[in-house]
């Protein structure tokens, strides 16, 4: 399959709005209608339904992984790293600007974690560790997400340097991190104003 085709497939996988679908299955309100208005696991958790929030989180992580894995599975062997990198960005864009939600969507944290897991499990584990440390100490999901987004590209380049085979995925991680930060613009304003809400307990599912 061509790079463009696999990028489109990754985008469509990312576009699946699991927060909305899971909420319907659990007879919960549309997550875009309450709280932060964000269709992600953290907002679903505001309903008090931990099972729905957990399922949303796992589904968003899984689609990030799947979007990249499909690209890795069907890519031209000579363009494997490039195709995986493009798919990584495409699946996150799909989550953030879903064709099924009129090009709106979540903030991409859980999906980005799935992407990292597909690209390199060590980068994913290190990034998740940063998320957990910040979340446990500060109890602010968006702060943990922003810290993780800032950390992931550095870890990616640190582990794999600037070698030709590692360059494309490392750049993809950096692009995904920028997208995650961009989607957290309102949270950054709230953090600066000291008005950002605290977590009641969840995973890395701000998006």
Image (cartoon, rainbow, N blue to C red):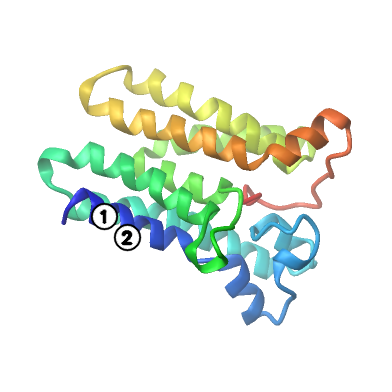
Picture quadrant of residue 11: bottom left
Front-most of 135 and 78?
Answer: 78
Left or right of residue 11: residue 131: right
Left or right of residue 56: residue 89: left
Picture quadrant of residue 31: bottom right
Quarter of the image with the N terminus is bottom left
Establish if 132 lies above or below 103.
above
Picture residue at 66% right of the left edge, 69% below the top: 52
Count residues near mark 2 (Cα–Cα under 10 Å), then give few for <14, some for 14-19, many for 20+: many
Q: Position of residue 109 (x, y in %)?
A: 57, 46
- Look at the image and tell me whether residue 135 can be seen: no
Q: Which mark is residue 195?
A: none
SS state under label 2: helix
Q: Which mark is residue 9?
A: 2
Q: Position of residue 19 (x, y in %)?
A: 61, 66
Q: Which mark is residue 6?
A: 1
SS state under label 1: helix
Picture residue at 36% right of the left edge, 29% below the top: 170
Establish if 172 lies above or below 17.
above
The answer to the question of whether label 1 and label 2 lie on touching residues, with beta carbons closer than 8 A, is: yes
- Look at the image and tell me whether residue 10 can be seen: yes
Picture residue at 47% right of the left edge, 49% below the top: 93
Establish if 100 lies above or below 109.
below
Give the residue at the far front of this rendering. 102
Picture residue at 45% right of the left edge, 29% below the top: 174
* CA–CA distance in space, label 1 to label 2: 5 Å
Front-most of 103 and 121?
Answer: 103
Q: Position of residue 125 (x, y in %)?
A: 49, 37
Q: Position of residue 141 (x, y in %)?
A: 72, 43
Count residues near mark 1 (Cα–Cα under 10 Å), then give few for <14, some for 14-19, many for 20+: many
Front-most of 81 and 200?
Answer: 81
């Amino acid at each position: 399959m061509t790079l463009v085709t696999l990028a489109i497939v990754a985008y469509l996988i990312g576009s699946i709005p699991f927060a909305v679908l899971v909420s319907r299955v659990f007879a919960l309100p549309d997550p875009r209608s309450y709280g932060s208005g964000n269709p992600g696991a953290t907002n679903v958790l505001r309903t008090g339904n931990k099972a729905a929030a957990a399922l949303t989180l796992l589904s968003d992580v899984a689609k990030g992984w799947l979007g990249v894995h499909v690209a890795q599975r069907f890519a031209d062997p000579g363009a494997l790293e490039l195709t995986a990198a493009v798919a990584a960005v495409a699946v996150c864009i799909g989550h953030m600007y879903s064709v099924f939600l009129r090009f709106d969507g979540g903030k991409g944290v859980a999906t980005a974690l799935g992407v990292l897991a597909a690209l390199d499990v060590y980068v994913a584990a290190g990034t998740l560790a940063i998320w957990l440390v910040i979340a446990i100490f500060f109890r602010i999901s968006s702060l943990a997400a922003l810290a993780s987004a800032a950390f992931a590209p550095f870890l990616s380049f640190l582990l794999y340097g600037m070698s030709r085979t590692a360059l494309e995925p490392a750049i993809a991680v950096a692009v995904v991190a920028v997208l995650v930060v961009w989607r957290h613009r309102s949270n950054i304003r709230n953090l600066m104003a000291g008005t950002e809400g605290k977590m009641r307990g969840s995973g890395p599912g701000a998006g």
